[in-house]
């Protein structure tokens, strides 16, 4: 099987598995699928969930698209070649309860072909990151440790690099160093070469794609029935505003999609369901809201910031959920 | 008095007058002022109103700023010169009631100086546009006719040109031809020259700036006590989502401010207070929501689309408010 066929099979399998898992956790809402075709070549499966017991809005989308290299692509992506192929899975899940974090992930590959149809370039990218509204340090450690383990299984140099890249990418630079959330991993333009093979990057995408299950679902289970007040919901909606700011002002994938006739509704699926923008809103210093904000301003080495005792206590607690 | 001093006096007077008028219409909330300084030169007065009887969130801001021409400015604004000066007033008003439209306006001037401090270029820009959530054709005509009259008093070629520029500017191009609202007027880079003097553009800004009173306040009075349901509010929040999309993805002023260390909270004051993003939301064909959408997709020549009888009936109705 060709590389791209392996990757396409992987993203479709992951899409099925994650949708099924999220439906089980939600217990009420079901994903609805929209299949779409792209006039220039290829298409996608957009699967959205809304107004569930747990998930207020979410999507798990795959797309497999291809076409001629256009002038816009030559300029914006700085690529050459005659034809291109791209496949990816991307997801954003917005829970209703402000104590359940939002999660985003995206795993993708890209190929370029010359006039004879030979592959002249191929790269991989991806990542998963967490956007809590309240900081649960145990969850933050668990999330990062799970992705560290997934990366370490492929190469132990990956997690530190990808964690740093993630911390540098999801920044609302117009607000100084304020990040959208507490990070995770992010990597891009990864090719086969001296140190790594194509299999390295395929395996990494599979490991990290499936790490969603262990990294996120226990956090959802742990908090999905937490009680909350309108003030908690208010803060969630303020932070969701920052999510909107990042996605519409800075996110490369979103902007590229909007400027190149991508499927708008699939791209903007990522935007949170209800959002608030208030003039100069500042949480009270030392409040729970401020603690979260500080964690977004100052990245923490969550994966290594834990004792064995804490790890066991967390495991015991989540096992009883 | 120098041109720039005249313009600064005008924007401060207009800011005072509009804030006072809006407070009268609201009857409860008061504008709160934040004065800010810009380290590189100048500053501004941000005045915001929130949670009133009528206005859920709004701002009327002025700024008078100056500095050295930077490389970013040379690239993005394609300007030369040594130092620059800019002054402007800008406002966005988001009423709570979905039957009261949102309004935006902005009037500004810019000067460039050479090393000896001589003015080497000066231009003016501005505009006012309306974003209703439900279409009241009488209001739409009144709004456009008021700005047509303000423009006509200076030059009868202005309104048709500025109306067209407005219809072409406030477009969510990622959604095809869908505009943010039903337009108004918009002009930019207007200089003294063969046909016009600096006084032309100063007078235009004053006429159009003050036309806010006649154009908008009667519409607010007419609808501020309209009854509405959660479904109307829901649609308003969906449309507010499109407002966010336009401002964060396309608006030149917003993006320039975000990328050049502008005062973030003053710039993002424009974002609506509560917003909804739903996957692939489409109003039912023929519904009131759809009628508004169609008016955003297909601009109407509102100013000329009216009989004398209709004009009188409208005047009679609004006079009794």
Image: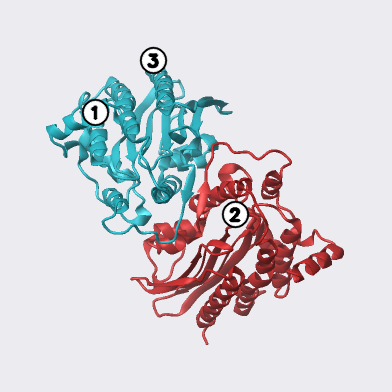
Chain colours: A red, B cyan
Placement of the C terminus of chain A among the 4 image quadrants: bottom right
Judged left or right of residue A250, residue B226 is left
Q: Which residue, given by chain and number where applicable, does mark 1 sit on? A: B151
Co-location on one chain, circles 1 and 2? no
- Tell whether label 2 touches label 3 (CB within 8 Å): no
Q: Chain of mark 1?
A: B
Cα separation, mark 3 vs mark 2, equals: 46 Å
Residue A83, can we see it? no
Cα separation, mark 3 vs mark 1, equals: 24 Å
Disc 3 versus disc 1: nearer the observer: 1
Query: Where is A117 relative to B127, above or below?
Result: below
Looking at the image, is mark 3 or mark 1 earlier in the sequence? 3
Residue at the top extreme?
B1
Q: Residue A36: horizontal and vertical position, in percent?
A: 39, 72
Q: Residue B31: horizontal and vertical position, in percent?
A: 50, 26
Residue A189 versus residue B312: which sits nearer the camera? B312
Element assignment for label 1: helix
Mark identifier at residue B294: none
Residue A224, can we see it? yes
Judged left or right of residue A142, residue B91 is left
Q: Which residue, given by chain and number where applicable, does mark 2 sit on? A: A170
Which residue sits at x=24%, y=41%? Answer: B137
Mark identifier at residue B2: 3
Which residue sits at x=75%, y=68%? Answer: A318
Element assignment for label 2: loop
């Amino acid at each position: 099987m060709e590389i791209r066929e392996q990757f396409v099979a992987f993203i479709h399998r992951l899409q099925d598995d994650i949708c099924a898992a999220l439906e089980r956790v939600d217990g009420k809402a079901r994903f609805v699928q929209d299949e779409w075709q792209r006039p220039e070549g290829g298409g996608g499966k957009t699967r959205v969930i809304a107004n569930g017991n747990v998930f207020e809005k979410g999507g798990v989308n795959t797309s497999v698209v291809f076409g001629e290299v256009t002038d816009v692509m030559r300029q914006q992506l700085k690529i050459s070649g005659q034809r291109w192929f791209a496949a990816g899975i991307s997801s954003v899940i917005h829970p209703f309860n402000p104590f359940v974090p939002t999660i985003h992930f995206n795993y993708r590959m890209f190929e370029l072909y010359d006039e004879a149809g030979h592959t002249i370039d191929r790269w991989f990218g991806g990542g998963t990151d967490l956007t809590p509204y309240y900081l649960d340090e145990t969850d933050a450690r668990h999330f990062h440790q799970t992705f560290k383990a997934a990366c370490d299984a492929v190469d132990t140099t990956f997690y530190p690099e990808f964690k740093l890249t993630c911390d540098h990418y999801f920044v609302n630079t117009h607000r100084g160093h304020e990040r959208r959330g507490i990070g995770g991993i992010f990597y891009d333009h990864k090719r086969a070469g001296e140190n790594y093979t194509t299999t390295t990057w395929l395996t990494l995408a599979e490991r990290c794609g499936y790490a969603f299950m262990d990294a996120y679902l226990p956090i959802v289970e742990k908090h999905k029935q937490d009680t909350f007040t309108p003030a908690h919901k208010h803060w969630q909606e303020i932070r969701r505003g920052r999510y909107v700011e990042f996605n519409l002002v800075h996110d490369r994938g979103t902007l590229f999609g909007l400027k190149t006739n991508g499927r708008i509704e699939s791209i903007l699926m990522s935007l949170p369901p209800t959002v608030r923008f208030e003039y100069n809103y500042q949480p009270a210093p030392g409040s729970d809201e401020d603690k979260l904000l500080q964690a977004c301003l100052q990245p923490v080495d969550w994966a290594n910031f834990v004792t064995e005792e804490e790890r066991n206590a967390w495991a015991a607690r989540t096992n009883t959920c």
